[in-house]
Image (tube, helix red, strand yellow):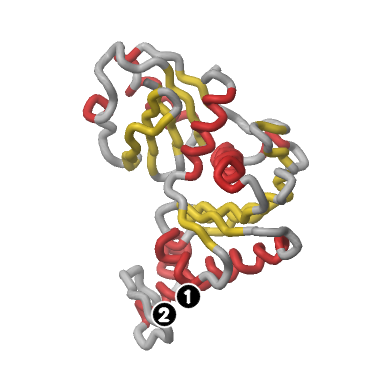
Amino acid sequence: MKLLLDAGNSRLKWGLIDHDAWVAQGAFSHDEPWDLGAVLPPVGGLDAAFGVNVAGEGVAARVTEALRSWTVPLRWWTPEAACCGVRNGYDDPAQLGADRWAALVGAWHLQQGAALVVTAGTATTIDVLMGDGRFAGGLIVPGVELMKRALAGNTAQLPLVEGSMARLPTRTADAIHMGCLHAQAGAIERMFRYLSGESGAVCLINGGAAPMVMPLLGIPCRLVDNLVLEGVRVAGCARGFR
């Protein structure tokens, strides 16, 4: 059994596969204890750990320490010029975020065609994957919660409170909530225009805010759980977790 990891800005997402098939998935917040013993097989039942990390060296060290009892090799995957049918169009391929690269590989594996690859998390990434497998470029914008916190922290009368879905908000909390969601949806829809000439193009969206953003989108869209982990799985299997 193998452990796959997505160390993001706010959570450590994990998945277990056996013979390349998913067995379980879950996540730990960075501000809670990581009880890996409760979710992983007993010591001796894990062969390898493979993942992506955008959270920095401190989180990488924490993962290494948490896995110490299992004594398995841990490999962090970093972006490259090409992998599993996807070509990296960044000016410097190594500068692309590892989570974005993994999501693109996962999207290509699922779609085998043109896709707008969206991860709506702490930040929202919106990446254009052409029908020939070329990553053409993309955007990074503040995520929904970051937008809300920016408003609350830089204005005198816009509080950080929970809002509700409303077509035309008539309460400040709802106006903030919907404003942030529409800002996400608008950026996504504008980027989808770059795929207007691509047959069968679809938006593949994942991340914690995805279920709130997706109903506002007026484009072909599909909600995919843990697209980054799916890309990690595809790449790990392709390279034998080396």
Q: Looking at the image, can residue 154 be seen?
A: no
Gap in Å between the C-alphas at discs 2 and 1?
6 Å
| Residues at marks 2 and 1 touching, judged by CB atoms closer than 8 Å | yes
Q: Which residue is at a point 49% across and 38% down the rendered structure image?
A: 230
Q: Quadrant of the C terminus?
A: top right
Left or right: 158 as drawn, with respect to 103: left
Q: Position of residue 80 (x, y in %)?
A: 68, 31
Q: Which residue is at a point 49% across and 31% down the rendered structure image?
A: 233
Q: Position of residue 149 (x, y in %)?
A: 42, 63
Residue receiving disc 1: 179
**Number of numbered callouts drawn:** 2
Residue type at the position of mark 2: Ala
Q: Secondary structure at mark 2?
A: helix
Q: Which residue is at a point 57% across and 65% down the rendered structure image?
A: 220
Q: Nearer the viewer, residue 197 or 175?
A: 197
Q: Quadrant of the N terminus?
A: top left
Where on the picture, by quarter, is residue 7?
top left
Q: Nearer the viewer, residue 95 or 127?
A: 127
Left or right: 161 as drawn, with respect to 151: left
Q: Position of residue 174 (x, y in %)?
A: 37, 78
Disc 1 crowd, CA 10 A, few/some/many (<14, 14-19, 20+): some
Residue receiving disc 2: 175
Left or right: 207 as drawn, with respect to 32: right
